[in-house]
Amino acid sequence: MRALALLVSYVLHPLWTPVLLLGLLWVLDPWLRLQPGVMIYVATVLLINALAPAVSIFMLHRRGVLSDLEVSERKERKWPFLIVLFYQVLGYYALTRPGVYLPSEVLGLVVGMMAALVVAIFVNRHFKMSIHLLANGGAFGAVWSFNQLHGLGLEAWLPLGFLLAGVVGWSRMRLGVHTPKELALGFLVGHALMRAVVEWGWMG
């Protein structure tokens, strides 16, 4: 069962979740498929934002800065978080540079991710919140928001988001990385912030 937990944790890793989310929205939302050029550009930025931090975090681990690639020690999470946020800010500028048109809902995905990570950085000073569930909750919030905004008719399928969160949460507990409270907080923060930015238009 530990091998299965590891598989779930790595396949649904927070670094890959934004790319997986964009692919899922592409499948579910016909409105997005009307803009293939924009979506390919966004996907490229998100892919870079996944690979570059992954390499950086791996190098930190090789140099002994991180005890493990899971970054399971709360006090060691500061630099990985800041590295990911740095690349997200670069991605935001790439998506908002002159000449690039991006629908507010799509840009909201990136803003929501950055907002969630900023909250995680502050929370981590006192409490170890699950970043896997932060990303999972954010992805669920994004799908929910696009369903509301574009009338995708996914109401009957949305409970699957909670099921997926449960599977990811089980994997993190099975690996001994998080407690139920840490998982629940991550999911709620990610979900709430993503819906606030994407669905309710809190773009700042």
Image (cartoon, rainbow, N blue to C red):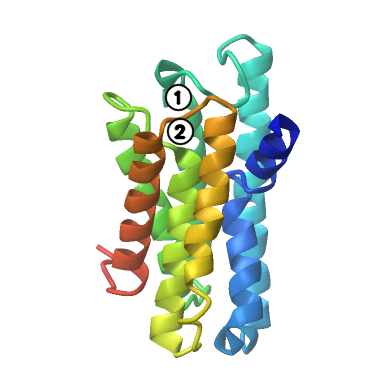
Q: Is residue 168 above or below residue 160?
A: above
Give the residue displayed 58% in from the left and 74% down from the top: 25
| Discs 1, 2 touching: Cβ within 8 Å | yes
Residue kind at label 1, given as amino acid type: Arg
Q: From the image, which quarter does the C terminus lie in?
A: bottom left
- The residue beneath circle 1 is 77
Local secondary structure at mark 2: helix
Which residue is at the front of the view, 172 or 186? Answer: 172
- The residue beneath circle 2 is 81
Residue 189, x across and y down, in percent: 32, 50
Res 156 label: none
Give the residue displayed 52% in from the left and 74% down from the top: 99
Give the residue displayed 69% in from the left and 35% down from the top: 6
Q: Is residue 156 above or below residue 129?
A: below
Task: Count the labels in the image.
Answer: 2
How much space separates mark 1 and mark 2, taking CA atoms?
Answer: 6 Å
Q: Is residue 53 above or below residue 189?
A: above
Residue kind at label 2, given as amino acid type: Phe
Q: Quadrant of residue 104?
A: bottom left
Q: From the image, which quarter does the N terminus lie in?
A: top right
Local secondary structure at mark 1: loop
Residue 114, x across and y down, in percent: 40, 50
Q: Is residue 71 left or right of residue 52?
A: left
